[in-house]
Image (spheres, grey):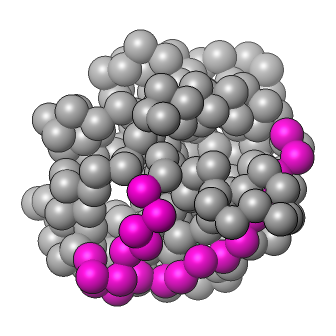
Amino acid sequence: MQVHPKFLLSAFAPAQFPTTGVPEIAFLGRSNVGKSSLLNALLGSKQAKVSSTPGRTRSINFFAIQDGPQKTTPRMLFADLPGYGYAKISKSISSEWPKFIEPYLTDRPTLSLCLCLVDSNIPPQESDMQLIEFLANANRRLVVVATKADKLSGNGRAKAEAALCKGLNVDGVLMVSSKTGAGIKDLWATIQAAAKEEE
Ligand code: GTP
Ligand code: MG
């Protein structure tokens, strides 16, 4: 899909969240899972910073996704969130997160889809499970996206997919690679369907 992305702002408090009112897609996952890389792969250009030091992002970074360069109202927003779970496994994912993330996830009226990123190369993690349960309790629509699928062979991919579905208690995961572009088209279709339903 041909889109025209534009970095909007970095928010450190709810008062700074954009008020455009269009459907929003959140990118969630542990530090280093590949959130920013996936955002860039979807947009076909380098918009979000890919970190060499994990856990650096402390803000929600908003991007406006426009159909054409001339349009003023964006079709949707992408929200790149701080990663969790890098330091040590804590009781709650939120204890490592800036205070405003949890209210963002529960209260943000325009949040249409949560992309829960998990690394396809590692077994299901407790912190990912916690996030998925949190979002399910908040009645959020979510999709589990398994990143870095390029590191796996075909057989390894099928095994990882099964293990993640079982471990995270979900019906399916979307296997993607920001490096090769595998699964990116399918992910776009999922995102557009969610955004459209919200309109
Ligand atoms: P934080 O912002 O620190 O939470 O990290 P992040 O989740 O945004 O991860 P980021 O996109 O910065 O990527 C982390 C590392 O994983 C980088 O070294 C990327 O190059 C690598 N990476 C991301 N996506 C892929 C992928 O699809 N395949 C491979 N092989 N590496 C990837
Ligand atoms: Mg990042």
Q: On the picture, is 13 further left or further right than 189?
A: left
Looking at the picture, tell me which residue is in the foreground, 49 or 1: 1
Percent position (x, y) of residue 99? Answer: 18, 77
Task: Give the residue drawn at x 63%, y 49%.
Answer: 75
Count of marks placed on residues = 0
Question: Is 5 covered by the magenta stretch?
Answer: yes
Q: Quadrant of residue 19?
A: bottom left
Residue 130 versus residue 47 in the image, above or below: above
Percent position (x, y) of residue 84? Answer: 36, 66
Q: Quadrant of residue 186?
A: top right
Q: Quadrant of residue 60?
A: bottom left
Looking at the picture, tell me which residue is in the foreground, 122 or 175: 175
Q: Which residues are magenta?
A: 1-21
Question: Is 185 covered by the magenta stretch?
Answer: no
Q: On the picture, is 168 further left or further right than 69?
A: left
Residue 130 showing in the rendered view:
no
Residue 166 versus residue 3 in the image, above or below: above
Task: Give the residue drawn at x 44%, y 34%.
Answer: 198
Task: Give the residue drawn at x 36%, y 32%.
Answer: 141
Residue 162 showing in the rendered view:
yes
Task: Give the residue drawn at x 27%, y 67%.
Answer: 101
Looking at the picture, tell me which residue is in the foreground, 173 or 61: 61
Percent position (x, y) of residue 147? Answer: 63, 44
Percent position (x, y) of residue 165? Answer: 43, 20
Looking at the picture, tell me which residue is in the foreground, 106 or 8: 8
Residue 65 versus residue 158 in the image, above or below: below
Q: Which quarter of the figure is the N terminus placed in?
A: top right
